Amino acid sequence: MSSYSEESPASPSSSAAAGAIACSSNPIPIPIQTDTKTLTWPENGELDLDWIENLISTFDWSSKNLPPSDFPSVLSVQVFDTLILTASKILHKEPNCLRIDPDDSSTVVVVGDLHGQLHDLIFLFGQAGFPSQNRFFVFNGDYVDRGAWGLETFLLLLAWKVFMPDRVFLLRGNHESKYCTSVYGFEKEVLTKYGDKGKHVYRKCLGCFEGLPLASIISGCVYTAHGGLFRSMPLTPSKRSKGKKKNRRLSFNSEPKSLSLGSLEELSKARRSVLDPPWEGLNLIPGDVLWSDPSMTLGLSPNKERGIGLLFGPDCTEDFLKKFNLKLIIRSHEGPDAREKRPGFGGMEEGYTIDHVVESGKLITLFSAPDYPQFQVL
């Protein structure tokens, strides 16, 4: 059972900016709003920077001055539908593993878990700068749950995606799922804010989650994914394929006798549209990418603590980096509460930790929600 509440906005913390890699040191002003506004979709159907800035100031003001049930007066279901449909069409066309190749004059900002902390996201934009032609953003999943403004956070990021689809990239986290959102607060948040239209809005969000890519490769040398590494799914002849060679079919062996690291090619072919367990067959790779954790113990093993995904040691990090000529892995997925239970790993006081240092590079855990969790599961 989960408990949802609209809490007083936490004071934005400098650790929100620390919880992002490659932040700018030149803060930009965030527009301030003094009364309620109703957002409308542009007549020409195209978003621009003025519309985004208006969205930011409106969400910021309404989160501090209106009860949750008044949210439709700010963003109607009609505007919500148009935004999420437009964004979903873009996201569903993107590959499982994005290739992001900025030029030498560009900056890439990678952001970890946000968990509904709208005000820290706004603060982060103020510190790092808005997305632009020479500033890319990669968001590493977990936009909702555990915080009071998951809907506003997710919709703001979708608006940026629609406005700058080749500069803003939204990866999926394990909380972008039906199971997590029904347990950790997002479903109840949506129902509270949209009332009798809440189920419709929630279903549309779930449909959008299905389209979120799983990982990215930045500049050919940085792998980003919410949980981390994943297993190989070797192709083996199916039991029904005995007989003539021309009738033989290949199927995925969902229970390999031993675990081995998967390849980027396997990742590109994984089925990402399934939101929840059971993670098996074609769904095992997405389950690993979203739920796995680093370990100080060598090798790959089932992640028994979570009941899903893998634990991967520094030798796996080295093998993955070396095999694909990478220098850095950036993953998220673990906040301060998780790290308190993991002896040998650094905490999240600075917004990130360096977990593995190997010959070919490093593995970093990045977390961008400094006031996490804003509300607890009972």
Image (spheres, grey):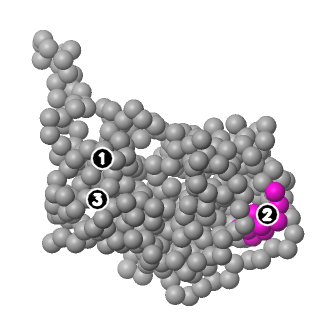
Check the image and report above or below for 247 versus 29: above
Check the image and report above or below for 84 versus 147: above
Which label belongs to residue 256? none
Question: Which circle's residue, 1 or 2, is located before the other in the chain?
Answer: 2
Rounded to the nearest angstrom, the CA distance separating label 1 from label 3 is: 10 Å
Going 25% across and 32% down the picture, which residue do you hit? 254
Give percent across and percent down for residue 342.
33, 61
Q: Please name the residue that numbered disc 1 is placed on.
A: 303
Rounded to the nearest angstrom, the CA distance separating label 1 from label 2 is: 41 Å
Considering the numbered disc 2 on the image, is that residue within a helix, a strand or a loop? helix
Question: Which circle's residue, 1 or 3, is located before the other in the chain?
Answer: 3
Say if residue 39 shows up in the picture: yes
Q: Please name the residue that numbered disc 3 is placed on.
A: 294
Q: Check disc 2 and give the amino acid type.
A: Ser
Rounded to the nearest angstrom, the CA distance separating label 2 from label 3 is: 39 Å
Q: Name the residue at the bottom extreme.
A: 26
Check if residue 56 falls in the magenta segment.
yes
Give percent across and percent down for residue 56.
71, 68
**Relative to 369, 284 lies left or right:** left
Give the quadrant of residue 107: bottom left
Going 66% across and 58% down the picture, which residue do you hit? 149
Q: Please name the residue that numbered disc 2 is placed on.
A: 62
Give percent across and percent down for residue 161.
57, 59
Going 22% across and 72% down the picture, which residue do you hit? 357
